[in-house]
Amino acid sequence: MKISKIIPYSLAEELELTSGDTILKINGTAPRDLIELSFLLADEEIELLVEHGDGERELIAFEKDVDEELGAEFESAVDKIKTCANHCVFCFVDMIAPNMRATLSVKDDDYRLSFLYGNFITLTNLTDSDFRRIKNFHLSPLYVSIHAMNPAVRAKMLRTPRAAKIHEHLDKLEAAGCEYHTQVVLCPNLNDGAELDFTIAEILKRRPHAQSLAIVPVGVTRHRRDKFPLTQFDKSGAAKVIAQVEKFQSQSRAQTGRTFVYLGDEFYFLAGRDIPPADYYDDFPQIENGIGMTRNFTDEFHAEKIPSSSAKLTVDVISGTSFAAVLKKLAAEIPNENLDVRILPVVNEFFGSTVNVSGLLTGGDIIRALQKSNRPRDKILIPATALRAGEETFLDDVTVDDMRKIFPAQIEAVSTGADFLNALR
């Protein structure tokens, strides 16, 4: 495993490891992934076989505390990503624009990345060896894409016979002592209605191994080429789903004190309904999946002190069309005559106007929207979710620096409600 970064003052720095070094073996065993590397490094006496950037190999022997970490980051968490062999009718990867960077086309279906980073997997490519490894390394919780608990419906949606084994696969996870969070991508006339009732009921039966269930609406971009008929929810359809799921939420809260079943924020936007209060989301177990993100953003905003300033400040706030109304409402609560905040909803021309979330906005669409507005501004706030993790690059490979060359205003990425309010100070 190749080192990409050494943490200052760490054990790795003390051992004089550097970026570009590759760890070949730990106590004679070659680690397959970050999980195995962590377990092997848990010993107190370590022999590390390292290949340096110049090709020279070195055996480094040392002693360490049991809980002492190496202090290095790696180029990849796994040796080779286990990819998805399914052909899901709603697969978003199949709906991206042609000629985008290759990493966006990787269909990750790797249980190790599910454990490490919360990526959702279908379980269809797991072998008996994988289930044993999940048990032996105590890999819990995992994140599982369910979509339907009716075997026939799930096989139809994922287009593979192995998808019909969902009950058997969940049984194996539970036998391995694994807890798991679940999700459903809800598609009209496919896994909604009575099928959704059945899916929720079956997952509820699997508590406490099943920790949560998130239901998100299917998204369709203008680049979808699949001939399978797929539609999106409208206002009345979204309202029907909310009413349907609320029955299970009330039942779960009465039984356990937890909501357990959560709806994606998009359902409430589509239906014109208010986002539920924070206690509805329990401890926000699926916020990285967009579940409760709006509520968390709003509550963080209200927890901060409203900014005051004697200096005039003009700010343009970039947003996807679905979240813009929330930002407008929050901006209206700021009683500051010197602060001119304009929320700029950006229509997603790149993926299609039906894709309305901020996280899928591209740099090109944002630039065009700002150019059309044609007004001077001191600051531009952009959604951090639209940028590649750890970088200032949008999905279309436009960078924030590219944007800075066009607009003289200060450009700042915002991710939380606190960030939003602090950026207006």
Image (spheres, rainbow, N blue to C red):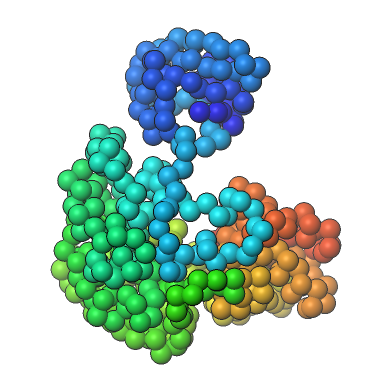
Is residue 379 shown to the viewer in this render?
yes
- The spot of residue 418 in percent (x, y) is 55, 61
**Residue 203, quarter of picture:** bottom left
Q: Is residue 214 left or right of residue 7?
A: left
Q: Residue at x 42, y 23 (%)?
A: 30
Q: Is residue 304 above or below residue 274?
A: above
Give whichever of 261, 222 is nearer the camera.
Answer: 222
- The spot of residue 329 in percent (x, y) is 56, 80
- The spot of residue 52 in percent (x, y) is 60, 18
**Residue 338, quarter of picture:** bottom right
Q: Residue at x 47, y 25 (%)?
A: 70
Instruction: Report the label total.
Output: 0
- The spot of residue 296 in percent (x, y) is 45, 65
Give whichever of 36, 13 is nearer the camera.
Answer: 36
Q: Residue at x 46, y 65 (%)?
A: 91
Is residue 209 shown to the viewer in this render?
no
Q: Is residue 375 above or below residue 36?
A: below
